[in-house]
């Protein structure tokens, strides 16, 4: 899939998924977010950038960590996600959170503008993750912390069959790079290409729990990366996808009808390099 098309699929796909995202995923992602927040080096008064902020689950935690003397700028490619984060901030009275729709690969901020930069579960969707990491490094002051989390290895994520099941029923792969960042050594190499220093990584094995098949299907099909493809399915195709996916996770069905599915997250943190690179050329984000 070419980069421009991938950005369009992501932008409108996450617009479609936005309303279903938190009900489907919020509780499953807490452990990954705990890790990310704990290694992001946040402190009161900091100015922090978040890319691919989604509905603001991590944004809120950053905002509490930096306090009202700090600033959080939350960015995402999807307007519906940006709007959700802005609503969350308004509802919680987090006036130090600013939201803006922005591609992670083309950050419209000056060099060294932030004290730290964070990205939770967003790099897998970006056509050029090294470019996104390089941009995070550029806008973070030298020595400032950069922390990112992605899904881990495909073989350790028990729900991974959703992609081939949906791909078989649409014209092109819905999320070609999804497990591309979580393999052994891949993200480590990417952060080093982006110039980060003093890097460390954490691989966390977790169990994702959904109380029943309906909530699992809603998270996987309506609230995640295949949402745009799924919106266009005829009812009989949707039924086929649901049956095939439940078949693929049958081993994780518990006696009470809940599902406990293994998954892995990979978090990497490092420091922005001493000398900043020139701002990359702006480009058409295809949207
Ligand atoms: C799984 S959600 C993660 C949201 C949030 N960070 C969290 O952990 O709950 C992935 C997000 O990445 C965003 N995204 C995808 N491609 C992007 C890009 N090129 N630039 C910025 N955000 C992007 C999507 O719009 C979506 O909101």
Image (spheres, helix red, strand yellow):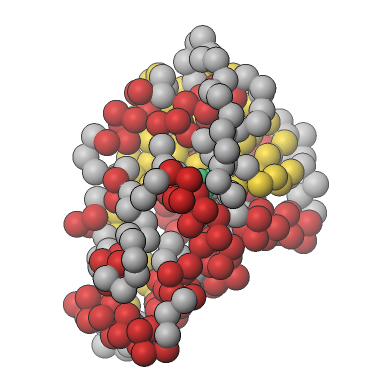
Q: Going 80% across and 47% down the picture, which residue do you hit?
A: 95
Q: Position of residue 97 (x, y in %)?
A: 73, 44
**Looking at the image, which residue is at 21% across and 40% down?**
184
Nearest the eye: 283 or 227? 283
x%, y% of residue 233? Answer: 42, 80
Residue 13 on image: x %, y %: 51, 62
Residue 185 visible within the image: yes
Q: In the image, is 184 to the left or to the right of 84?
A: left
Residue 42 makes an appearance in the image: no
* Residue 282 percent coordinates (x, y): 58, 29
Q: Residue at x 29, y 45 (%)?
A: 180
* Residue 197 location, quadrant: top left
Check the image and report above or below for 283 versus 18.
Answer: above
Q: How many marks?
A: 0
Position of residue 256 relative to residue 283, above or below, is: below
Residue that extends furthest to the top in the rendered view of this protein: 275
> Is the residue 16 above or below the residue 37 in the image?
below
Seen from the viewer's position, the closer of residues 197 and 101 is: 101
Q: Residue at x 43, y 69 (%)?
A: 229
Nearer to me, 9 or 219: 9
Residue 149 left/right relative to 279: left
Decide which of 152, 230 is in the foreground and name it: 230
């Amino acid at each position: 899939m070419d980069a421009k098309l991938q950005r369009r699929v992501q932008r409108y796909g996450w617009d479609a998924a936005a309303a279903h995202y938190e009900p489907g995923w919020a509780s499953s992602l807490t452990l990954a977010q705990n890790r990310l927040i704990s290694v992001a080096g946040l402190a009161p008064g900091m100015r922090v950038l978040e890319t691919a902020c989604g509905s603001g689950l991590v944004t809120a935690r950053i905002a509490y960590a930096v306090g009202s003397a700090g600033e959080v700028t939350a960015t995402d490619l999807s307007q519906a996600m940006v709007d959700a984060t802005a609503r969350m901030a308004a509802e919680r009275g987090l006036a130090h959170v600013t939201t803006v729709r922005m591609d992670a690969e083309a950050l419209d901020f000056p060099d060294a503008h932030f004290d730290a930069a964070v990205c939770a579960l967003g790099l897998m969707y970006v056509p050029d993750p090294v470019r996104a990491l390089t941009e995070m490094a550029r806008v973070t002051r030298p020595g400032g912390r950069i922390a990112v989390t992605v899904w881990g290895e495909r073989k350790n994520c028990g729900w991974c069959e959703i992609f081939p099941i949906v791909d078989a029923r649409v014209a092109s792969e819905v999320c070609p790079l999804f497990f591309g960042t979580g393999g052994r050594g891949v993200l480590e190499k990417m952060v080093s290409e982006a110039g980060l220093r003093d890097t460390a990584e954490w691989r966390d094995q977790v169990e994702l729990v959904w109380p029943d098949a309906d909530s699992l299907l809603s998270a996987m099909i309506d609230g995640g990366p295949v949402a745009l493809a799924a919106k266009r399915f005829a009812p009989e195709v949707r039924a086929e996808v649901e049956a095939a996916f439940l078949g693929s996770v049958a081993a994780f069905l518990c006696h009470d009808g809940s599902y406990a599915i293994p998954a892995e997250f990979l978090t990497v943190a490092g420091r922005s390099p001493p000398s900043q690179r020139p701002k990359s050329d702006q480009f058409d984000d295809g949207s």
